[in-house]
Image (cartoon, coloured by chain):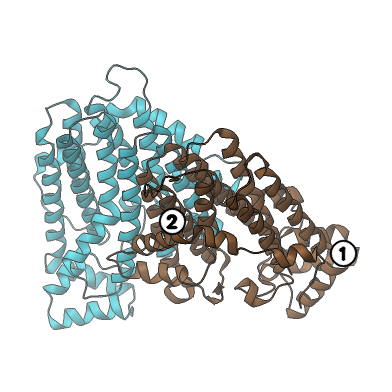
Chain colours: A brown, B cyan
């Protein structure tokens, strides 16, 4: 069921997230400790639900961006033991975790990261409320850091994410969704948090606006690439890569770029197919195989990956204003790693 | 179906929220404008869902507390047109609205403030996500005010509220719930926001800690009184007073103080009744009438109202450290008004 798309094999083999992981390892240890501490509560159900998701092996890419951006910009360069970047990285991860808990309720998902979704074990109620708790803890920790500029960036991201999720809901099961609307959804629901996670690094380090914009743009385009790849993989990855099932977007009637492109380029018969499955929600599992055939024939998946590569190139280009460093290389590698997930 | 409890008739007839409404009227107009502005979004579903609840005639008691406390403490006393209190009052109301949207999903409620709950019109999904959006907007506006101390108070309240909601979920349908656990639930889920709403007034006005503690305590005890009355009214009010149906807590298996007391004081037969309806969830509408009879016979409702009156007295006593003023009188009247709802 896997759709292989050609890519520069040299890049693919080099692409690794390892340099990023290595650079942030000590600080990431502090983030992980803080995550455990702040997911704690005398109300036993809170750490149970939170840790179910926290322990489920997410890559923690977003907090790594915060740590790497802060380090690259010289925050705590004299080793004074400053912890603003650790706290903001934790807050970013909690914002993400809260979104996942709420998403599972909204999408009625059964699985998350290859495990039963929290809502299947503790109910929708606990997923909603523990999500609210984690969002509250994220804000408390951000406030503790004391940077009003970072608070502004992260609270704005929280709004934009929710706005993107509502927009996604509004356009769900609607084949009139345009490419522009799709790009707005992924920019808001995914890329906004990548952007904010990266941007708060130079803010903490009091760097000039040019560097803040550079890292925000890097994060934004990386986030766009990440979501484009995710949406392509939904029709061509393996369940192990995805932590969910192939075809989940299809079954939920989520209109993603591959579907928009396949519909645009399809015959009248194809358009009737997409309308039946996506809008009228009449389909069975054999229709998923037919959808994947159409996505392949119309080169819709190929163009989705091409768009992801373009976003990745834009992310890398945004870093041009920053001097070369091990951190800059690691951030570039991280882009290539995200894109190589599709192979 | 109404349970009348005796109270000092003089107090009852005087008790009015009107002085508070009159004192904050001009600022409340600014709050209402800001509410409409900040509930706006290019994503059409957001203002639709938000305004359904915002326009439904809530009393806006919490933002009134913020405005009155700030005015009483001399914030903007020279009429410079400062708007920190207006912004924080709006943020407090959005935090409350977000909680209501999420509560309706958690409780599977059909009605809210005498109208269909948003989730019945737009689905659980929209209620969760628009709640998230409003919470995000609340934080953005708080950040805009720029007081880290007020941000700390309000973000802590957000966590405590969520914690209280999860605790309520944990003890639901469990007749072993103690009075102390019940008091912890209402302190967290309701009183914490009343406390924060009141406390940020003196914080904005840079008043000494003694006044901050006084107004926090006032808000906390008023919130406790408010929730105790609400829980009593669920078994003895009219649907018009409640904006929901009499017996909703009963039908949801919510263990409130009246039920805890009636169970403690009941015969073995009574205890078996409470276990059957609250834990085993086996009941019909005739059981509600029996429940109300037991609550009356054991004086469980009467003691609940007595506890509310005590909390109200504690709220009023907390204001002793503040000089007499029209604002102080209005805040005292507001306590008596809240308690007189039960008559």
Please identify the residue farthest to the right as the structure is shown.
A267
Is residue B174 placed above or below B318 in the rendered structure? below
The percent coordinates of residue B83 (x first, y second) are: 38, 27
Q: Report the front residue among A260 and B298.
A: A260
Sort mark 2 into few (<14), some (14-19) or many (20+) by Cα contacts within 10 Å: many
Picture quadrant where residue B257 is located: bottom left
What distance separates the C-alpha of mark 1 from that of mark 2?
42 Å
* N-terminal label among 1 and 2: 2
Q: Chain of mark 1?
A: A
Q: Report the front residue among B41 and B114.
A: B41
Is residue A94 placed above or below B269 in the rendered structure? above
Q: Residue at x 48, y 53 (%)?
A: A92
State the count of labels. 2
Element carrying mark 2? helix
Element carrying mark 1? loop
Quarter of the image containing the N terminus of chain B? Answer: bottom left
Q: Which residue is mark 2?
A: A90
Q: Report the front residue among B55 and A27.
A: A27
Is residue B289 placed above or below A303 in the rendered structure? below
> Same chain for the residues at labels 1 and 2, yes or no?
yes
Q: Nearer the viewer, mark 1 or mark 2?
A: 2
Picture quadrant where residue A171 is located: bottom right
Q: Residue at x 22, y 53 (%)?
A: B229
The percent coordinates of residue B242 (x first, y second) are: 32, 53
Q: Which residue is mark 1?
A: A298
Q: Chain of mark 2?
A: A
The percent coordinates of residue A77 (x first, y second) are: 45, 45
Picture quadrant where residue B86 is located: top left
Sort mark 1 into few (<14), some (14-19) or many (20+) by Cα contacts within 10 Å: some
The percent coordinates of residue B78 (x first, y second) are: 29, 16
Q: Report the front residue among A81 and B296.
A: A81
Q: Residue at x 75, y 62 (%)?
A: A11
């Amino acid at each position: 069921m896997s759709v292989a798309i050609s890519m520069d094999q040299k890049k693919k083999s080099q692409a690794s997230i390892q340099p990023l992981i290595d650079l942030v390892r000590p600080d990431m240890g502090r983030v992980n400790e803080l995550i455990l501490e702040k997911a704690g509560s005398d109300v036993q159900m809170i750490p149970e639900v939170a840790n179910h998701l926290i322990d489920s092996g997410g890559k923690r890419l977003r907090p790594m961006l915060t740590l790497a951006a802060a380090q690259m910009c010289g925050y705590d360069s004299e080793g004074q033991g400053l912890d603003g970047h650790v706290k903001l990285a934790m807050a970013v991860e909690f914002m993400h975790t809260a979104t996942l808990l709420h998403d599972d309720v909204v999408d009625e998902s059964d699985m998350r990261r290859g495990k039963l979704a929290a809502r299947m074990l503790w109910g929708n109620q606990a997923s909603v409320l523990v999500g609210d708790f984690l969002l509250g803890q994220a804000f408390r920790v951000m406030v503790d850091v004391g940077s009003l500029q970072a608070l502004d960036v992260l609270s704005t991201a929280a709004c934009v994410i929710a706005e993107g999720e509502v927009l996604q809901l509004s356009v769900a099961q609607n084949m009139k969704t345009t490419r522009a609307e799709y790009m707005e959804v992924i920019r808001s629901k995914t890329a906004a948090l990548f952007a904010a996670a990266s941007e708060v690094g130079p803010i903490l380090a009091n760097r000039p606006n040019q560097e803040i914009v550079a890292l925000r743009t890097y994060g934004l385009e990386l986030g766009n690439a990440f979501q484009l790849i995710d949406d392509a993989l939904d029709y061509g990855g393996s369940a192990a890569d995805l932590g969910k099932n192939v075809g989940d977007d299809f079954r939920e009637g989520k209109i993603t770029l591959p579907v928009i492109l396949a519909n645009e380029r399809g015959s009248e018969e194809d358009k009737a197919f997409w309308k039946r499955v996506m809008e009228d929600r009449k389909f069975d599992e054999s229709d998923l195989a037919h959808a994947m055939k159409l996505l392949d024939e119309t080169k819709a998946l190929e163009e989705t990956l091409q768009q992801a590569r373009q976003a990745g190139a834009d992310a890398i280009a945004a870093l041009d204003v920053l001097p070369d460093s091990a951190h800059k290389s690691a951030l570039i590698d991280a882009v290539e790693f995200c894109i190589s997930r599709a192979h």
